[in-house]
Image: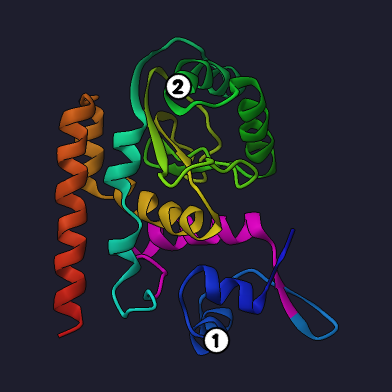
């Protein structure tokens, strides 16, 4: 289902004026029906990730209490609930997704076959590769039925072509599963920001375990909070 103008402002915690400026200056993809803008959900997700990669910032607004959305949507908790997988032997995109979902299904309490089909369908619409060796497989069609988001970090045995725009092969995957629409879009932006950090990419090359990776994410999110507080002074 495509989104209306007010749907996007609500999901991204931004004002109508901000979204209008983005439409004019930042090439937010949209079309019109009877003179009113509409936004394709998949294209909006792709624009969010591309914006983060190109500008190294989160295209997000503020929560109702005035705090940054960077603080509200916690990647640390998502990875803590999820898992790290380092023994994937599949060599094609579809087979990798299926193998990972089989391995992660017990941890996430999901049906691996159904979720695999949803993830593959999303990849067929548009690749989730960020470039630089990292992709963020996700699907809006599946939401976790609890109050905790989850992320699964996967280190591939061999790099594969995930359809990255820069032509690079992918060796690290960050599967993202959220609880609701807002969390999905906001965490997607945060994951992209984390994944495009040069420090993160260097660390991921060493395939750290879950505890080491959580320490890195905690440091990353603390820096975001500090920078957000400084920018508001």
Asked whether, in this view, residue 197 is left or right of residue 98, the answer is left
Percent coordinates x, y for residue 122 in the rendering:
65, 40
Percent coordinates x, y for residue 5 in the rendering:
65, 78
Can residue 226 be spotted in the picture?
A: yes
Asked whether, in this view, residue 154 is left or right of residue 219, the answer is right
Could you tell me which quadrant the N terminus lies in?
bottom right
What residue lies at 21% left-to-right and 54% top-to-bottom?
221
Residue that mark 1 sits on: 16
Q: Quadrant of residue 214?
A: top left
Camera-side residue of 197 and 41: 41
Asked whether, in this view, residue 213 is left or right of residue 56, the answer is left
What residue lies at 68% left-to-right and 28% top-to-bottom?
117
Q: Earlier in the sequence, mark 2 or mark 1?
A: 1
* Tag of residue 104: 2
Q: Mark 2: which secondary structure? A: helix
The secondary structure making up most of the magenta span is helix
Q: Residues within 10 Å of mark 1 (few under 14, many from 20)?
A: some
Asked whether, in this view, residue 122 is left or right of residue 176, the answer is right
Percent coordinates x, y for residue 28 in the rendering:
58, 71
Q: Residue furthest front?
A: 146
What residue lies at 57% left-to-right and 85% top-to-bottom?
20
Percent coordinates x, y for residue 147 in the rendering:
43, 47
Residue 41 colored magenta?
Answer: yes
Residue range (magenta): 37-61
Residue 18 vs 105, above or below: the answer is below
């Amino acid at each position: 289902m495509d989104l209306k103008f007010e749907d996007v402002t609500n999901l991204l915690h931004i004002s109508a004026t901000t979204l209008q400026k983005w439409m004019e200056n930042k090439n937010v993809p949209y079309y019109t029906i009877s003179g009113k803008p509409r936004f394709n959900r998949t294209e909006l997700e792709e624009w969010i990730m591309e914006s983060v990669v190109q500008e190294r910032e989160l295209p997000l607004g503020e929560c109702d209490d005035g705090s940054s959305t960077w603080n509200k949507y916690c990647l640390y908790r998502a990875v803590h609930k999820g898992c790290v997988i380092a023994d994937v032997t599949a060599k094609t995109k579809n087979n990798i997704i299926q193998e990972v979902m089989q391995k992660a299904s017990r941890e996430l309490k999901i049906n691996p076959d159904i979720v695999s089909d949803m993830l593959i369908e999303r990849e067929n619409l548009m690749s989730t590769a960020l470039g630089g060796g990292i992709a963020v497989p996700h699907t809006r069609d599946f939401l976790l039925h609890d109050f905790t988001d989850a992320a699964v970090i996967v280190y591939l045995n061999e790099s594969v072509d995930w359809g990255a725009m820069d032509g690079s092969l992918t060796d690290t995957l960050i599967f993202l599963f959220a609880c609701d629409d807002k969390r999905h879009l906001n965490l997607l932006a945060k994951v992209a920001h984390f994944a495009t950090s040069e420090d993160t990419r260097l660390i991921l090359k060493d395939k750290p375990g879950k505890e080491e990776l959580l320490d890195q994410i905690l440091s990353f999110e603390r820096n975001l909070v500090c920078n957000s507080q400084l920018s508001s002074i």
